Amino acid sequence: MECGRLSKSELVYELKIRGLEDVGTMEEMRSTLRRLVRMEKDGESLKYPEYQLVADDELKICEVKLDDLGKLLSDLTTDERSSPFKKIETKLQHTLMRVDRIPTTTEEEKKKRSKLLAKLLQLKTQLLQRDKVVNSLQRNVNLQGVTPAQTSDPEEATVVGMSRDGGMSEWNKRIPVFDDERGTHPVEFVKGICVRSFCVPCGRLVDNSADGKESRRPTTFVSPPAILGSVSPLFGIDLPSCFVRAHVIKKSSATCQRKLKH
């Protein structure tokens, strides 16, 4: 458990069950808890006094925590080495031990506690699965040889790929990040891949041009099937298993026209 990733209320709880209260600032609480956890790992744990927990209060608190963790997990797009992943992992561990300590006396309390434990195990499984999906995406990106180009101008931001065979010759082209009437979209790199470029929702590729002026900077997106297959389950996007090419044909000051070609 990484103490630095716990909230103030979680730190207070972890210290209270170990017989410590009013430790001080957040940093002092973290420092104290780190020392105690280290002693526990080394087998030098102190004999803590029994702390009386109220079952009903703890059941409600843990239920809220699990709902919050579920939301954090649904937004997670990084692997086990990232700070968001470790934060969720630490809070899951804290909540698991907290549910395990709930003193149940009635059948209803036992059933509620059992449901919380089942949900916790489900979230832990989902966290591990999400890590596998992200790592799979990274392996596919490495196979394609995609590397981000450095730029200070967002309109000129590009992703440069390397072709693996003749059928992917267009993959050698520079791929400018698209812009539309709402402005230039920021580049979001995940492990060297511009997810924004590869995950252009097909709904945006529509004809909403106001005039016939030709764009000076055509935009092309080319996404290998291997990458599409990995991105789809991770981001919940239904993408075709073929090359996606979106060309900016015409645009005005407010709108632009896009075509989707298979």
Image: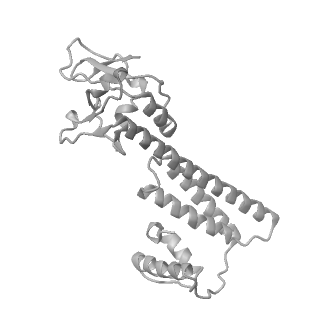
Residue at the far right in the pictured view? 107
Residue at the far top in the pictured view? 212
Does residue 247 appear to the left or right of 97 in the view shown?
Answer: left
Quadrant of image for the C terminus: top left
Q: State the count of labels.
A: 0
Residue 52: percent from the left, percent from the top?
67, 80
Front-most of 150 and 196? Answer: 150
Q: At 47% from the left edge and 38% from the top edge, which residue is drawn?
A: 235
Q: How is the image coloured?
A: one colour
- Decide if residue 180 is in sight here: no
Does residue 103 appear to the left or right of 15 in the view shown?
Answer: right
Image vertical order of residue 17 relative to residue 189, above or below: below
Residue 102: percent from the left, percent from the top?
69, 70
Q: Quadrant of residue 153?
A: top left
Image vertical order of residue 204 relative to residue 113, above or below: above
Front-most of 109 and 258? Answer: 258
Image vertical order of residue 209 relative to residue 171, above or below: above
Q: At 49% from the left edge and 78% from the top edge, which residue is drawn?
A: 33
Q: At 44% from the left edge and 56% from the top edge, which residue is drawn?
A: 84
Residue 190: percent from the left, percent from the top?
37, 44
- Decide if residue 109 is in sight here: yes
Does residue 219 appear to the left or right of 106 in the view shown?
Answer: left
Front-most of 114 and 133? Answer: 133
Does residue 150 appear to the left or right of 84 in the view shown?
Answer: left
